[in-house]
Image (tube, helix red, strand yellow):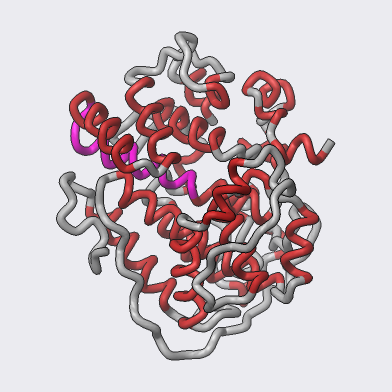
């Protein structure tokens, strides 16, 4: 573990990537929309715990995710529904279903809590994967920050296109804060929109790993040190191994 | 996105490589080194990551190694949003991810599409 992302890395890591990690960790530690700081940092610990969960490995290895029964090896800090969302989201995301989502919600999670946890899963998976990819240790999770969740619910959020509510660009209101760089923002961008703060925090960090929105559909340009086809080949192969149909 | 970027770069790509691994049909420069690195990152096998990362570094240098690692990592987040929120997969690439492309890439065999019937 290291308190500074990419500290003592063998490679010269661009400063905007280091800054993006530092800012993302500070935001993860702050009170969120539906979870307080302590709960959010418990989610971080559970994400890291999931990597060594034997039951997760059994599910991943099974022909069908529903073919095995067992119990996740958890930290003990979170509810069963939270643990199920985190462990399956980390270890076998390509084989989730709408029925599974409904079962997790029925286990006692609100839609807002679900989406906020997904935002943390996605953020931590990117950052921990990036440090591992460059041979660096995981970054230490920050200390707990006191404060209350905002409990802001966007009035335009509705379940229609996806399994969870989404705020379509035309339904965003000023109180949501900055939402979309373009009304054509893809559904991958809209995924966390029912918790606007989670969406903003996630994309501020993720864009420094892939591409800011304005470059995504400019296929003849790259702002990275590998070409766009090289980037997309790595992306597609990684997504394929995750069985992501999107 | 892969298809669009390779068409504009006038580069050959075999879409099936997305699900089956790299073949001779994909002619993107340094594809083997980069795909091996991406696959190692998904495996989280640190020894395999170090071995494949060294090849990328020796071939393409520091900045490309950092950006290759960063890009591969980004898709560890995107897939989790897509698959836990259940966003509609047929809207990928602004709706240009047509059924025949998914079929050619082997994506129609994925669990989620099979479950959707």
Q: Quadrant of the N terminus of chain A?
A: bottom left
Pinpoint residue B99: horizontal percent, then vertical percent.
74, 26
Residue for point 66% across, 30% down: B97
Give the prevailing secondary structure in the magenta stretch. helix
Is A191 contained in the magenta span?
Answer: no
Residue for point 46% across, 59% down: A123
Which residue reaches farthest bottom?
A147
Report whether residue A9 is seen: yes
Residue for point 57% across, 84% down: A150
A141 shown above or below B84 = below
Name which quarter of the figure residue A190 lies in.
Answer: bottom right
Which residue reaches farthest top?
B24
Which residues, given as a range, are shown in magenta? B60-76
Residue for point 72% across, 41% down: B112
Please state if B63 lies on the left or on the right of A237 as rendered.
left
Q: Quadrant of the C terminus of chain A?
A: top right
């Amino acid at each position: 573990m290291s308190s500074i992302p990419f500290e003592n890395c063998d490679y010269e890591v661009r400063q905007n990537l280091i800054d993006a990690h530092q800012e993302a960790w500070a935001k993860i530690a702050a009170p969120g929309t539906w979870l307080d700081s302590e709960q959010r940092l418990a989610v971080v610990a559970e994400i890291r715990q999931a990597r060594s969960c034997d039951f997760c490995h059994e599910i991943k290895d099974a022909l069908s995710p529903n073919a095995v029964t067992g119990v996740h090896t958890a930290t003990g800090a979170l509810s069963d529904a939270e643990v199920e969302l985190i462990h399956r989201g980390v270890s076998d995301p390509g084989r989730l279903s709408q029925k599974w989502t409904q079962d997790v919600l029925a286990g006692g999670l609100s839609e807002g809590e679900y989406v906020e946890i997904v935002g943390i899963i996605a953020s931590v998976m990117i950052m921990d994967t990036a440090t591992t990819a460059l041979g660096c240790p995981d970054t230490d999770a920050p200390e707990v920050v006191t404060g209350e969740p905002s409990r802001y619910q966007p009035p335009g959020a509705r379940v229609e296109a996806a399994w969870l509510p989404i705020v379509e660009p035309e339904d965003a209101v000023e109180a949501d804060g900055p939402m979309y760089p373009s009304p054509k923002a893809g559904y991958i961008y809209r995924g966390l929109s029912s918790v606007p703060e989670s969406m903003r925090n996630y994309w501020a960090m993720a864009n420094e790993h892939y591409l800011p929105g304005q470059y995504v559909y400019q296929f003849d340009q790259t702002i990275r040190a590998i070409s766009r086809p090289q980037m997309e080949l790595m992306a597609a192969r990684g997504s394929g191994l995750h069985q992501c149909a999107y | 996105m892969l298809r669009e970027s390779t068409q504009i770069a006038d580069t050959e790509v075999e879409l099936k490589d997305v699900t089956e691994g790299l073949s001779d049909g994909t002619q993107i420069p340094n594809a083997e080194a980069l795909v091996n690195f991406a696959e190692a990152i998904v495996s989280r096998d640190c020894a395999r990551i170090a071995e494949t990362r060294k090849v990328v570094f020796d071939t393409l240098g520091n900045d490309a190694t950092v950006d290759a690692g960063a890009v591969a990592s980004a898709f560890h987040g995107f897939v989790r949003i897509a698959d836990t929120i259940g966003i509609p997969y047929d809207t990928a690439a602004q709706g240009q991810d047509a059924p025949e492309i998914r079929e050619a890439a082997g994506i129609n065999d994925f669990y989620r599409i099979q479950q959707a019937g």
